[in-house]
Image (cartoon, rainbow, N blue to C red):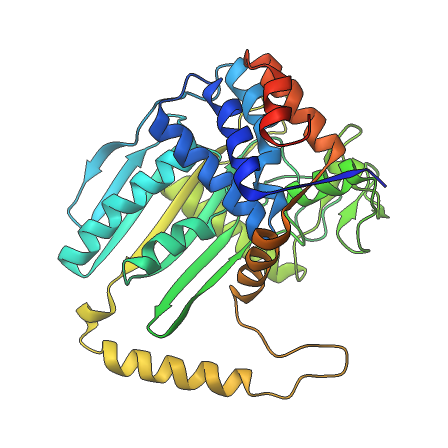
Amino acid sequence: MSEQHLIPVDRLTQAMRLVVRGFGSTDDEVDAVVGNLVEANLTGHDSHGIGMLPRYTASWREGGLRPNTHVQVVGDGGTLLRLDGQAGFGQVIGREAMALGIERARRGGSCIVALGNAHHLGRIGAWAEQCAAAGLVSMHFVNVISHVVVAPHGGSDARFGTNPFCAGVPLPGRPPVILDFATSVIAQGKTRVAHNKGESLAPGCVIDDQGRPTVDPRYTVIPPWGALLAFGGHKGYGLALLCELLGGALAAGMTQHNADDTKKRVLNGMLSVLIDPDALGGRAAFEQQAHAFLDWVQASPPREGFGPVQVAGDAERAARLQREAQGVPVDATTWREILAAAETLGVDPRAVQAAAGLA
């Protein structure tokens, strides 16, 4: 089991700002990238948090990540937008893409945003939250162009990425419902975190390089390569295919169709559908029925061994409260990788250590 640091949120943010400045990013970009990564850690999704910085650094070194780059409109049909992320930081590109979609949806009642060529978009729930804060319902289908890590249902090796699906529903008087998940049993980043911590995975998540079940996370972190499994067998696999066809082929014009693992960049395509309930003429009825349904569902008495029934987004909000109060856990292996990335970027690792309060 790896040693673990517990770092206060403000100290962690200061330390990560030092690292991200090493990319040559503007202050606004530093704010966007660090804010998004730390937010992922706060919500309990360490797989999409600061532990991604070593991968971003490797991608930047090979030219796969372009700092200080903004989203480009390449097709404008009013409420249908085609956007190119130009391999810019996904934390910037995603926010800019959703801002464009939100403005069009408010004007026209809905908007379809087809985004391609964005560097790692991070936690997709952040973009559903941005839409929900604007009062919009949203759905997001995402593909991943990177080292393949997920096996098709019944297949014995990896053929595509973790291809997330996300949806967000805003409701007054209660937090939004934010459903955000990889179509694999667990996100690839969670296997990296488990590997760094020296932990095993739950059965049914991974197969090894021979296609056999294993609980060792190494098979999606270091060679020889195995694969993650899709959640729910053929159901998760079917949704993964849709994410590739819609977020990849349709939105980005780019799908995963080879096993090239020589590049460190992670590119995403995302097809987003934004809807303004007011434009349907029935926001009041929608909200009343949504509240009634959620109240009815959550009134179910919990089974033995479970707490009160939750809805999507509750677990993230609980994690945030805990980590804001107690600090963000970062395993020692991940922290060493971040310090090495800082040095690669020309940032003094001792300054990062000091900023985090670990000197």
Left or right of residue 126, residue 316 in this image: right
Q: How many marks?
A: 0
The one of 22 and 289 positioned closer to us in this rendering = 22
Residue found 37% across the figure and 29% down from its top: 29
Residue 335 place in picture, x, y as percent: 69, 30
On the image, which quarter does residue 247 sit in?
top left
Q: Is residue 306 visible?
A: yes
Left or right of residue 86, residue 333 in this image: right
Left or right of residue 254, residue 190 in this image: right
Q: Is residue 163 visible?
A: no
Residue 148 place in picture, x, y as percent: 63, 35
Left or right of residue 134, residue 63 in this image: right
Residue 245 place in picture, x, y as percent: 45, 46
Position of the N terminus, as image quadrant, is: top right
Residue found 82% across the figure and 38% down from its top: 2
Q: Is residue 261 above or below residue 234?
A: above
Position of the C terminus, as image quadrant, is: top right
Q: Is residue 72 above or below residue 163?
A: above
